[in-house]
Image (cartoon, rainbow, N blue to C red):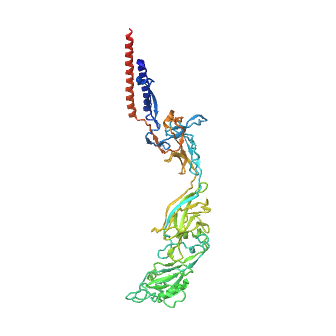
């Protein structure tokens, strides 16, 4: 090569240094550009073909080396539509070739970028800061799955989300094994149950077709009471209803009254509306002598109720029987004397059974009776086909209890409110018409996974036939001291119409629409493209790339990466590293200029030889 070859090589070194300096300059200039990928410089030696003993160091050239596969830091952002790819891959984008009537016309060529600062423009497109439009795959609103696999430019119009009628209600709850209804009395077995006999004739609220239950006798037992004898002993059937101190008479005597002055009315006992009056002697009909015994009084009460099981007294405790003709209700004008018999205020015994064939409905006349004999089961807002909201109320009523003995099992009925303003014979509550029975372990037996509310109409609004899903073991009957229904889940799938108000990016890489009705609906899945030769993509303006033969075609799919919403990827340029490379490049450039200076001096010396 000689002296002029050395001069040419030094010039090549200067050119390579300038090339490296240009890359360094670009990297530093874009150190704050979103998702910018720096360009490194590779130096290649150019060796002329010579004999082995005549080999030379040769010249040099510079080439760019891409760092497309090197990720920048992911930092949070306050804009919900900003996004970053954590891992490999690129967003698929397009850029308009022009605009017609203000709308973009795309050239159909896919580009790829890591720049995720996308925001909605006036036309509903997601456009990043470099003017590229995001691509993705729309989501089928029915299935929630992508509609196809080919990406397309995404556009979100400010349309209404159609209303969806309630079709299912997910329900999970525990029913207290002993419900504390308003009508319950812990001293009366079965008082916690719904009593068909307490409802209007022909309106048995139990499951449709339930056979009418015959009335059964019930009883009420008072507290143990002692007489006035000395020493005092327990009352017996022979104990008198009135007497002096030290006698075998109840502690507080009944009185026949006096003619006065002043006039003192005679004491009375009222049995199911029939009044028994106390007289001094010669009692007839519905009268008792004040000198009669407890046994005589019990016989008089039994004659009025018509019970087949006589009332008794044992150990000072009186047990009264209702019989089957009517519920028993005993009161007295002398509450003190009644208390001396063991009953405070009144003695009440409600018959078991009764009622007609089950109609599965509660009418307006029986609304208060039903509320007193059932417990709240929660409420949910359901929607009809037009999206109109309906308050769907539930109540549970226990219809049978295993505590009553052989032949009985824990059983419940579920009701929903039909008309909160029902009167007369208008239907107020509707039975779901299924008996929910429970085993001793508190689990349904048999299990009921769901029940349909056939042709449900609530407050005049038709809900179709929504299905209540209980799932596996969704309804249980465990003991609960509160005696209430503990609702653990009550959720329905309907909603009113709503208008798109904003979009955001979810953690699973989907565009989510936020509607005015409170619904968040997946609208599209963001397309992420990967390449076998990522660093061989062709760089174009705006942080975008185009595929080349060396990069291979785009492969769509997450590729092990994730999309992070409300975030942006920073430039992968390291300023400190670039400054270091800048110093090295400057020194190398200066060294090459030194070679040129030295070569020039040698050439001058050669020219001086011929002077």
* Residue shown at 62% from the left, 71% from the top: 209
State whether residue 52 appears in this view: yes
| Front in this rendered view, residue 129 or 35 | 35
Looking at the image, the residue that sits furthest to the front is 52
> In the visual, does 500 lie left or right of 566?
right
Count of labels in the image:
0
| Front in this rendered view, residue 364 or 136 | 136
Q: Position of residue 320 (x, y in %)?
A: 50, 82
Q: Choose top left, top right, bottom left or bottom right for residue 430.
A: bottom right
| Front in this rendered view, residue 192 or 151 | 151
Which quarter of the figure is the N terminus placed in?
top left
Residue 380 against residue 526 in the figure, above or below: below
Residue 445 against residue 54 in the figure, above or below: below
Residue 212 against residue 589 in the figure, above or below: below
State whether residue 289 appears in this view: no
Q: Position of residue 143 (x, y in %)?
A: 58, 51
Residue 312 against residue 381 in the figure, above or below: below
Q: Position of residue 343 (x, y in %)?
A: 46, 80
Q: Position of residue 80 (x, y in %)?
A: 49, 44
């Amino acid at each position: 090569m000689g002296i002029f070859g050395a001069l040419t090589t030094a010039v090549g070194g200067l050119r390579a240094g300038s090339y490296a300096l240009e890359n360094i300059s670009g990297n530093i200039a874009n150190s704050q550009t979103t998702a910018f990928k720096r360009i490194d410089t590779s130096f290649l030696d150019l060796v002329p073909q010579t004999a082995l003993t005549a080999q030379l160091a040769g010249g040099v050239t510079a080439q760019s080396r891409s760092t497309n596969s090197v990720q920048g830091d992911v930092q949070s952002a306050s804009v919900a539509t900003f996004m970053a790819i954590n891992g490999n891959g690129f967003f698929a984008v397009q850029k308009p070739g022009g605009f017609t009537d203000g709308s973009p016309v795309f050239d159909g060529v896919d580009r790829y970028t890591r720049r995720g600062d996308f925001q909605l423009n006036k036309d509903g497109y997601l456009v990043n800061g470099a003017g590229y439009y995001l691509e993705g795959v729309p989501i089928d609103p029915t299935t929630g799955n992508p509609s196809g696999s080919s990406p397309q430019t995404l556009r979100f119009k400010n349309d209404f989300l159609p209303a969806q009628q309630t079709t299912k209600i997910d329900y999970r709850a525990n029913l207290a094994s002993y419900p504390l209804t308003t009508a319950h009395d812990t001293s009366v077995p079965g008082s916690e149950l719904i009593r068909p006999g307490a409802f209007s004739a022909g309106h048995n609220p139990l499951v449709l077709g339930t056979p009418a239950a015959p009335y059964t006798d019930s009883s009420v037992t008072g507290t143990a009471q002692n007489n006035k004898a000395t020493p005092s002993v327990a009352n017996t059937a022979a104990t008198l209803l009135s007497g002096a101190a030290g006698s075998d008479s109840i502690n507080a005597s009944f009185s026949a009254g006096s003619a006065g002055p002043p006039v003192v009315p005679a004491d009375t006992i009222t049995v199911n509306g029939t009044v028994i009056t106390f007289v001094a002697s010669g009692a007839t009909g519905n009268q008792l002598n004040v000198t009669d015994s407890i046994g005589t009084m019990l016989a008089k009460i039994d004659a009025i109720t018509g019970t087949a099981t006589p009332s008794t007294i044992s150990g000072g405790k009186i047990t009264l029987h209702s019989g089957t003709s009517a519920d028993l209700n005993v009161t007295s004008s002398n509450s003190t004397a009644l208390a001396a018999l063991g009953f405070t205020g009144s003695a009440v015994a409600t018959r078991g059974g009764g009622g007609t064939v089950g109609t599965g409905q509660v009418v307006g006349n029986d609304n208060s009776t039903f509320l007193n004999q059932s417990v709240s089961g929660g409420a949910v807002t359901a929607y009809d086909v037009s999206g109109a909201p309906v308050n769907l109320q539930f109540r549970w009523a226990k219809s049978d209890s295993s505590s009553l003995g052989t032949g009985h099992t824990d059983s419940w009925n579920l009701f929903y409110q039909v008309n909160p303003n029902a009167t007369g014979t208008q239907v107020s509550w509707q039975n779901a018409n299924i008996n929910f029975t429970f085993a001793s372990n508190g689990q349904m037996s048999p299990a009921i996974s769901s029940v349909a509310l056939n042709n449900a109409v609530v407050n005049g609004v038709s809900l179709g036939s929504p299905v209540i899903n209980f799932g596996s073991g969704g309804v249980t009957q465990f003991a609960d001291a509160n005696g209430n229904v503990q609702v653990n889940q009550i959720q329905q799938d309907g909603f009113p119409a709503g208008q798109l108000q904003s979009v955001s990016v979810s953690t699973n890489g989907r565009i989510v629409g936020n509607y005015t009705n409170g619904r968040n609906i997946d609208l599209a899945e963001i397309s992420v493209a990967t390449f076998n030769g990522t660093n061989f993509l062709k760089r174009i303006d705006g942080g975008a790339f185009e595929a080349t033969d060396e990069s291979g075609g785009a492969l769509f799919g997450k590729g092990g990466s994730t999309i992070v919403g409300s975030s942006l990827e920073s430039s992968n340029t390291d300023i400190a590293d670039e400054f270091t490379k800048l110093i090295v490049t400057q020194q190398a450039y200066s060294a090459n200029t030194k070679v040129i200076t030295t070569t020039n001096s040698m050439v001058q010396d050669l020219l001086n030889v011929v002077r």
